Structures are given as C-alpha cells and as structure tokens.
Amino acid sequence: MRPFNGLSILLLEDEYLIALDAEDILTSLGVTQIKIVNTLAGAADAAQNGDVDLAILDLNINGELSLDVAQLFRQRGTPIVFASGYELRDRISAELEQGDVYLRKPYTSESLKEAVHTALGNA
C-alpha cells in the first residue's frame, strides 16, 4: 500500500518542471488528487474551498511570499509544507508557525515524502 492513498494536496508552484516532478512523486506515493496552481490567487481560491488535506506552498511565487495564502490554509486547519529553493527559513522564521514544515528544493522523493508525513503528523 502506498503511504498517502486517498490524500488530496494543493501544490502552489510557479516552475512548471518542478510542479510536474512533484506531481509524479506525489502520485507514486498514492496521492489521488493533486491540484496544481501557479499563482497566489489560485492558491487563495483553493484555500477558500477547503477541499484539500494538505498544501505544499512554494514560498516565493514570482517575487511574492506565499505567507498570506498560508494563513488562509491555517484558518481552515490545513497542514502546510513550505518549499523553497532559497535559504529563506532564517529570514522568515517569525512568519512560520509551529507545525509548518520547510522543504528545501530541489527535493527528492524521500524528502517530499518525509515533509508530507511530518506535516500531517503535526496537524
């Protein structure tokens, strides 16, 4: 059995190839519903609908931080994984909340699996 059978994930990612790679990894782990969006507005809409089990948010979307969108997911009780290719964790540590998970890009299948597992466990 794959570890995340039946899970629904929102993936906010503005790099097409990274989004495709993440989708492949998540599918191989059993995630059945993956909604990929590449804008903060698209992620905010998904947060309003509240129909995902977990949100993976690229921290920097076209020069803007996804922290406001993260707050929308937090209000719904949705666990969050922040992903970034930059070492921004120290710069934004005050904005992160207990239970948020930080994933450094590029990520591997194992690191993405661990981040999702940790975020779900923290929820």
Image (tube, grey):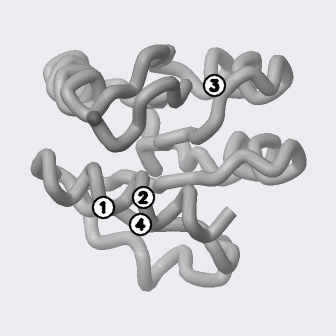
Q: Earlier in the sequence, mark 2 or mark 4?
A: 4
| Within-10-Å neighbours for mark 3: few <14, some 14–19, many 20+ | many
Task: Please tell me which residue is depicted at 42% across the width and 52% down the height of the picture.
Answer: 116
Q: Earlier in the sequence, mark 1 or mark 3?
A: 3
Task: Please tell me which residue is depicted at 52% across the width and 30% down the height of the picture.
Answer: 7
**Which tag is nearer the camera, tag 1 or tag 3?**
1
Q: Quadrant of the C terminus?
A: bottom right
Q: Point out residue 88 in the picture as x, y percentages from the top left corner.
A: 38, 70
Q: As rendered, which of 83 and 54 lies closer to the eye?
A: 54
Q: Are marks 2 and 4 in contact (CB under 8 Å)?
A: no
**Which tag is nearer the camera, tag 2 or tag 4?**
2
Q: Which residue is mark 4?
A: 102
Q: Which residue is mark 3?
A: 43
Q: Which residue is mark 1?
A: 114
The image quadrant that residue 13 belongs to is top left
Q: Which residue is mark 2?
A: 117
Q: Secondary structure at mark 3?
A: helix
In the image, is 79 to the left or to the right of 117? Answer: right
Q: Earlier in the sequence, mark 3 or mark 4?
A: 3
